[in-house]
Image (cartoon, rainbow, N blue to C red):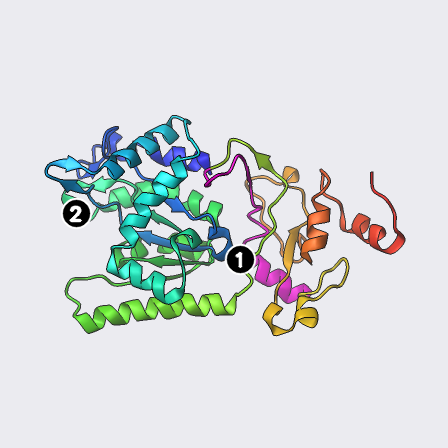
Amino acid sequence: MLKEFIDVISCDKCRQENITSILNDDDMNIPQPGFIGKNFWQKRILFIDRNPGPPPVKNGLYSSREVNYMKCLRDIGKRKETDTSHGSIRNVFQNYFTKHHIYKEVFQRTNLTLDDVAIFNVVRCRSFENRQPPKKAFRNCIEMHFGKWIKMLSPTLIVSFGKAPYDQIQSETKRYKIQTKFINRERSLNKAQRQSEIDNVVIFIQQALNENPNIEIQLPEEIVDENNMLSEGAKKQITINAYERNPEARRKCLEFYGTSCKICNFNFEIKYGTLAKNFIHVHHIVPLSETNNEYTVNPQKDLIPVCPNCHAVIHLKKPALTLAEMKNILEKGEQVS
């Protein structure tokens, strides 16, 4: 993820194209990547907004939090990330979202916290007088960053805080078949209408969480990149295989195979009851080294449901154990060196 953060921070496409309404400099208007909560992979809920608002100013001075935030972004852009970078960025987002009444209400009513979600703006730069960015700026950011971030995060659902960003990302969300809903924040709405917009999104999130109570528990893939990190307190991050956590591929795989482990036949619902209904890991059979950018996953041929124990053992070796090897271990007690 560090590369994606750096790509945003160092982006100057709008500046090169002289889109004057977009503020982009190396001082207090650095492009802002966003925030990925440490528990995001457990819910995979993405909040998006239009573009960053103006920095808080008091008596003509920027707040120390804002100055520190910009410094952290500069450091990350120069690959000088420290253990405090994520915490500093989190503090900025926490300060904003605990004060903004719409975000605050959505968090409270869905029992989500900042650490449960990912948040970023479609346009990553501030705009002059906080005006709506021009369509060209939206196009640039979607082309340069949005698609990459959607592939990286593979969100279960997206909530747009505003209709403008929602409208601009429709082609991408349809391409990846991601459930998306927006809160209309038009000033022309009366109090009851505004509340209704919030209520609808809260129900949307609650229904998604109720329908997929176990979607959050996924096993990390075996690829380890010590430079690919941006998480609190982490020394390295295990990159999650996008095919194993793609909700549409997972759904089709389980529709075909069911939810019992195809190695040991363990079924969580039979063992633990309805609490664990539909819980199972999905393993990607094809080694990532054999795929390329054009690779399209086949949920019936490339994915297989396995219990967490078997999934963990599969990845104890590199390359990963095959299903046949796993079954031989269980059925015949064969040792794999």
The image quadrant where one finds the C terminus is: top right
Residue 246 quadrant = bottom right
The residue that mark 2 highlights is: 131
* Left or right: where 97 falls relative to 256: left
Mark 1 vs mark 2: which is more N-terminal? 2
| Magenta range | 230-257
* Residue, far left: 59
- Residue 142 visible in the picture: no
* Residue at (27, 72) in percent of width and height: 196
Q: Position of residue 40 (x, y in %)?
A: 46, 52
Question: Does the magenta-highlighted stretch encompass residue 248?
Answer: yes
Q: Which mark is residue 216?
A: 1
Q: Position of residue 236 (x, y in %)?
A: 54, 35
Q: Position of residue 103 (x, y in %)?
A: 30, 58
Q: Position of residue 193 (x, y in %)?
A: 22, 71
Amino acid type of the residue that numbered disc 2 sits on in the rendered structure:
Arg
* Residue at (23, 29) in percent of width and height: 27
Question: Does residue 224 lie above or below 324 as drawn?
Answer: above
Residue 113 quadrant = bottom left
SS for dot 2: loop
The one nearer the camera, 152 or 35, is: 35
Amino acid type of the residue that numbered disc 1 sits on in the rendered structure:
Glu
- Residue 32 visible in the picture: yes
* Residue at (58, 45) in percent of width and height: 295
